[in-house]
Image (tube, rainbow, N blue to C red):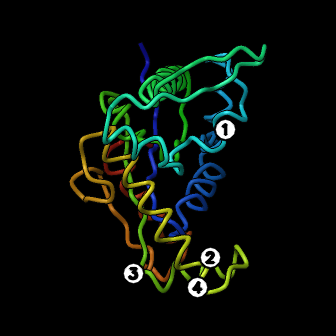
Amino acid sequence: MESHLIISIGRQIGAGGLGVARRLSEEFGLKVYDKELLVEVARESGLDESCFQQRDEHSSRGFRTALQSFRSLLGLYNRAGTNTVMTEEQLFKIQSEVMRGIAAKEDCIIVGRCADYILRDEPRLATFFICADLESRVRNLMKVGGKTEEEARRFIELGDRKRAEYYNYYTFKRWGDSASYDLCIDATKLGDDVERVVDLIKYYLKQRNLIS
């Protein structure tokens, strides 16, 4: 069976990881799965897409409970209106199955969602983590998101903590730890320039003969 190129991008809040993914998508003609993955998960599970909007990697409410009890139950509703009780673990399992299905049929870029761990057995998987210094991230959120400095700092602190909880719980690794990825890139060291980050990723992919 032919293996596909899978680019996994983890990122700190405000570090520009999604912009890097979109630029790589333009460069290679690959689909980016971020929020789009939730649509696929909803379709596979028979649940309404809106059920997942507050229950992806940015929501730690269920995960904090799971860490304490491992049995946190959530009431979700399918399109027919029938109550379906699922654990966070079951939702993660569905997401994992959907992700493996995508990897089996196409080259793609997956942003976050523990893709580096879920697809770890894929021979053509390349995993990256994009980080930046706090001040750069604050400036980015103020510029792009229209947040005040205080709002940006709070958003970063909360968002990073939720992502770390999610990742650490399901992968048994540490979010942002260099040992968890093929390559960690500090965007600030590259002038917070998306093109320079993309060039570095392309260089790495070429060195592994994943692209020509």
User: Which quadrant: the C terminus?
Assistant: top left
**Image coords of residue 4 (percent x, y):** 46, 28
Query: Within the image, what quadrant is residue 70 found in?
Result: top left
Q: What type is the residue that disc 2 sits on? A: Leu
Q: Amino acid at mark 3?
A: Lys
- 77 relative position to 118: left or right: right
| Coordinates of residue 192 in the picture (x, y in percent) | 51, 78
- Side of 1 relative to 18 (left or right): left
Indicate which disc residue 189 carries: 3
Question: Mark 2 falls on what kind of element?
Answer: helix
Judge by depth and name the residue closer to the eye, 8 or 64: 64
Q: Earlier in the sequence, mark 1 or mark 2?
A: 1
Q: How far is mark 3 from mark 1, CA to CA?
A: 30 Å
Q: Amino acid at mark 4?
A: Glu
Q: Residue 36, which numbered label?
A: 1
Task: Give the position of the N terminus as an image quadrant.
Answer: top left
Q: Quick check: 64 left or right of 74? A: left
Q: Are marks 1 and 4 in contact (CB under 8 Å)?
A: no
Residue 133: image location, x then y, percent? 41, 80
User: Could you give the CA–CA distance between mark 1 and mark 4, rounded to whole angstroms?
Assistant: 30 Å
Q: Residue furthest right?
A: 80
Along the line of sight, which residue is nearer the eye, 124 or 34? 34
Q: From the image, tell me which residue sits under label 2.
A: 141
Cα distance in 3D space between marks 1 and 2: 22 Å
Is residue 160 depicted above or below 37 in this figure? below
The residue located at (57%, 54%) in the rendering is 21
- Relative to residue 127, is residue 95 drawn left or right? right
Q: Indicate which disc, 1 or 4, sits on the residue closer to the N terminus.
A: 1
Secondary structure beneath dot 1 equals: helix
